[in-house]
Every structure is written in C-alpha cells, then in structure tokens.
C-alpha cells in the first residue's frame, strides 16, 4: 500500500538523508533502484514492515508491501512525519541565513531538517554510541545491537528492526557486553532500556514537552552516558537549536575558520555561533566549511 504525506515547503528528502550519518545506521538504508530512504520498522501491533520513502510533489510517498489497518496507517504516517520533520518551519532561520554568505545556500537546498529515528529511545542509544569512538565503531555497535536483539523482517530475515527497550532490558550486562561489544557504554544502554521499558523514564513525552530548553537539557543530561556533546545533538534532533554540539571536529573547524589553525576551546566554538541565538545549532550544522578542504567522518 502507499501513503502520501505533505511537507511544509521548501522540502528536500535528499537533504534530510544527507543531513548527518543516521542513514548509514541500520535499520535505515537506501534503495539502490529508486534512491529512496528505506527502513525496517516494528509497529505497535507487533508487525514488522519495510517502508520505502520517496519524494513526491509537496511531500513524500511511503510504500509498504503489505496491507495495513487504519491504525497502522496512522502509526506509519506519524512516524514518518516525525522522522522527516515534515511540518517543521524554518522560515525564521532562512531569513537570518540570507544575510550570511556561509549559510546563503540553506534555503535553496531546503536544508534544516535533520533525519531522526521514530523514537527518542533509538536516537539516544545511537547518540551514546557516537561518543568516544570513530564512526566505523558506531556503525559496528549499532549493527550488533540490531542483529542480536532486533526482530527480523519476515520477507528478509537477515534484516532486523531496532530493538525495543523491552528487548534490551531483558538481557544483562555480561550478555550485552559480549555480543554487542559496546564497551563502557554497556551499562548505560542497559539502564536506559530498563528505565524506558519499566515506565520510569518517558522519553517519548520529551518530543512534545512544552518546557524551556534549559529544563529539557537538564532532563537529557540526567541520562547516564549522555554528556554535553550528546545533549546538544539530542536537542537538535528534538528541534531545539540553541546549542552547538562541541566535539573535537567542531574545535578543528572553528580553529581553521577563525583562528588560523591555532588551538581553541569550547568557549570559542560557542562564541562563534552565539549571535544566531535559537538557531545557533543549525547555523553550525549547515555552515559552509568547504573552503577548509576538510570533511567529517559522518
């Protein structure tokens, strides 16, 4: 079956797919034939489906090989709308970007949306797995979690969905460490899964929480394994852009852009984008760094 979902213009599916490295992390993927975004997904009904998402006029189409109930269609639509930020409005950001040569491209390319997972739980897990490792390490760890604990796709058992909090909570530190090789992150991932599965932590509520960003930041920072960099990344995924995710790569870029390659610290990175206020995270994310002739791993 096929769903068609509208998006607020300007819109570009390819810009979302290229917005960061999530597309390289299973169960996301790309379709070699159409170039569309694919994802294996478990629905609330327990069914495991594969979605093929392609850009169409004024939005996207979502193709699922099997028939869906009305409730399942609504769930698929809700998840795709969140993953792609179909309703997000970046007009205020574009108005500011038009005045900055390094961001003059963003409106024409419909940049601003960041690819997200259907659940904040998956985004938090994957973000934790990006810390203190190379990108290849993140890919390996995510693949291990999915292959060892995710439910298989009926049409292709080699492909699996991202494990639910309950599936991960049912294991233990020793098993999780040995089969997924998450290193020091193992107890953090297990505790997070147990907290979400038990209902002690309602991550999904944070997606629409009407609370000030400092309070949201505080709640994210309370999750074990989530440091300042991870918090800034998660805030961006949640549509809160008033923080810059400062890591070694950000330090390198800002050093080359404004300090002639001299070492800089977090304060200099934050100061470089402070004038962008509520949009500073996006200003950093989509800044034109091409003149440095450097590329990030992700």
Image (cartoon, rainbow, N blue to C red):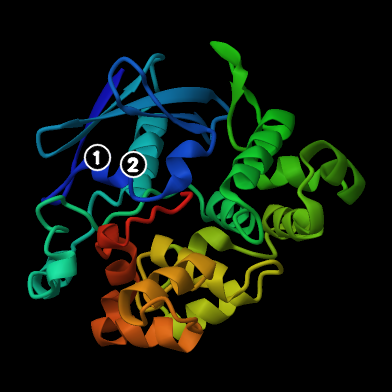
Outermost residue toward the right in this view: 174
- Of 257 and 184, nearer the camera is 257
> Which structural element holds mark 2?
helix
Write down the quadrant of residue 61 in the picture: top left
Write down the quadrant of residue 268 in the picture: bottom left
What whole-number distance in Å separates the C-alpha atoms at marks 2 and 1? 6 Å
Tell me what residue is drawn at x 66 percent, y 38 percent. 140
The numbered dot on residue 13 is 1
Tell me what residue is drawn at x 19 percent, y 43 percent. 12
Q: Is residue 175 left or right of residue 5?
A: right
The numbered dot on residue 4 is none
How dense is the environment of label 2, judged by Cα within 10 Å: few (below 14), some, or many (20 and up)? many
x, y percentage for residue 116?
A: 42, 50
Q: Is residue 67 visible?
A: yes
Write down the quadrant of residue 51 in the picture: top left
- Of 101 and 150, nearer the camera is 101
Q: Is residue 245 left or right of residue 256?
A: right
x, y percentage for residue 166?
A: 72, 44
Q: Quadrant of the N terminus?
A: top left
Above or below for 281 versus 148: below
- Of 106 and 208, nearer the camera is 106
Q: Which residue is mark 2?
A: 17
Tell me what residue is drawn at x 46 percent, y 49 percent. 298
> Which structural element holds mark 1?
helix
x, y percentage for residue 5?
A: 21, 37
Q: Are marks 2 and 1 in contact (CB under 8 Å)?
A: yes
């Amino acid at each position: 079956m096929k769903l068609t979902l509208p998006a607020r213009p300007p819109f570009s599916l390819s810009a979302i797919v290229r917005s960061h490295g999530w597309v390289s992390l299973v169960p996301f993927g790309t379709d070699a034939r159409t170039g569309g975004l694919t994802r294996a997904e478990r629905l609330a009904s327990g069914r495991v489906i594969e979605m093929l998402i392609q850009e169409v006029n004024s939005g996207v189409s979502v193709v699922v090989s099997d028939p869906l109930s009305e409730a399942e269609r609504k769930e698929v639509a809700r998840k795709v709308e969140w993953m792609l930020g179909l309703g997000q409005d970046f007009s205020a950001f574009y108005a500011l970007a038009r005045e900055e040569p390094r961001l003059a491209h963003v409106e024409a390319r419909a940049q601003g949306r960041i690819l997200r997972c259907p659940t904040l739980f998956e985004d938090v897990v994957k973000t934790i797995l990006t810390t203190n490792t190379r990108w290849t390490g993140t890919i390996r760890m995510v693949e291990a979690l999915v292959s060892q604990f995710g439910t298989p796709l009926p049409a292709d058992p080699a492909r699996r969905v991202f494990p639910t909090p309950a599936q991960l909570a049912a294991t233990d530190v020793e098993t999780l460490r040995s089969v997924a090789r998450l290193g020091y992150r193992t107890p953090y991932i297990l505790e997070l899964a147990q907290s979400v599965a038990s209902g002690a932590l309602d991550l999904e509520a944070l997606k629409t929480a009407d609370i000030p960003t400092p309070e949201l930041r505080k709640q994210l920072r309370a999750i074990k394994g989530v440091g300042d960099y991870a918090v800034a990344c998660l805030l961006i995924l949640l549509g809160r852009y008033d923080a810059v995710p400062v890591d070694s790569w950000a330090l390198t870029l800002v050093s080359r852009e404004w300090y002639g390659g001299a070492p800089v610290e977090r304060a200099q990175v934050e100061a470089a984008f402070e004038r962008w206020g509520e949009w500073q995270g996006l200003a950093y994310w989509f800044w034109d760094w091409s003149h440095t002739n450097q590329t990030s791993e992700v």
